[in-house]
Image: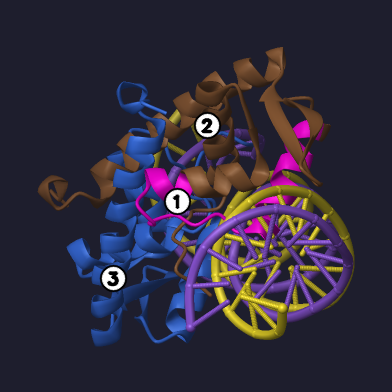
Chain colours: A blue, B brown, C purple, D yellow
DNA sequence: TATTATACATAAGAAAATTATGTATATTTG
DNA sequence: CAAATATACATAATTTTCTTATGTATAATA
């Protein structure tokens, strides 16, 4: 389908950041929120999202809580204490990266 | 060794950008230039760099020219015509990504 | 009633790194 | 002058993180 210009490694940070802002979210909700916040720029695929959520949970950064809504299940994820700490780290790393890349890539800053 | 916060996929763009600014460069020179420009923030490892250069060459984005300096060889890479076009595309994509991520991650823009 | 949206999941494969080696020459330092 | 560091290439095994494709099932909408 290939629109995607999501650099590998950034998905975790996006998930964590959203959970830091929203307390608890479920998978599908995350995909919709990202689409909304980025005006369709970023589309998180399910094949990337669910494994990422499972991994973050396995690492102890997220807690999961299953809820039944109507007849359908939802898995609500929220940050653990460790997850909150890691979120801060990852956000800082991301900011650094953005700043650095901005400088490398920005045409106004191209003094060799 | 793991400092690295290079998001996967960004290395190609970095290489192309540097070659757009410097006409021709060799591998080792690229690693040093990135280190210098980012004040040590980004360190391009050889295991990532050389395969990336080979790939860009195989895709016809780079031309290579071997030079002998003293008793040691250098492989100078430069953009092909196609490479120049692709560089523009990749830079635009990167700019988009940086803008989008900035919005997602920037604390000042955290209205849910 | 058929399509689209909601909601989860996983498996095969590809892409792009990391980490560890290997080879060799040139320069610097103790 | 010997040892260490820097220069300069390379590749292989492994890991990480996606894409793409597929599967299941319920709810809402056209």
Q: Which residue is mark 1?
A: B35
Q: Is residue B56 magenta?
A: yes
Q: Chain of mark 2?
A: B
The label on residue A80 is: none
* One can see residue B43 in this view: yes
Q: Of helix, strand and loop, which one carries label 3?
A: helix
| x then y, percent, for residue C2 | 66, 35
Q: Are marks 3 and 1 in contact (CB under 8 Å)?
A: no
| Residues shaded magenta | B34-57
Locate residue C20: give its quadrant.
Answer: bottom right
**Residue in the foreground of this view, choosing between A53 and A91:** A91
**Residue in the foreground of this view, choosing between B95 and B48:** B48
Is A94 rendered above or below residue B72?
below
Of badges 3 and 1, nearer the viewer stands 1
| x then y, percent, for residue D22 | 78, 55
Is B111 rendered above or below residue B17?
below
Of badges 3 and 2, nearer the viewer stands 2
Q: Which residue is mark 2?
A: B18
């Amino acid at each position: 389908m290939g629109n995607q210009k999501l650099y590998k490694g950034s998905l975790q940070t996006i998930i964590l950041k959203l959970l830091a802002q929203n307390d608890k979210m479920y998978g599908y909700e995350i995909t919709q929120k990202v689409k909304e916040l980025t005006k369709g720029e970023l589309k998180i695929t399910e094949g990337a999202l669910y494994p990422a959520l499972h991994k973050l949970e396995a690492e102890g950064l997220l807690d999961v809580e299953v809820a039944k809504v109507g007849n359908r299940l939802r898995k609500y994820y929220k940050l653990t204490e460790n997850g909150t700490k890691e979120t801060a780290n990852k956000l800082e790393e991301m900011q650094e990266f953005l700043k650095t890349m901005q400088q490398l890539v920005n045409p106004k800053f191209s003094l060799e």
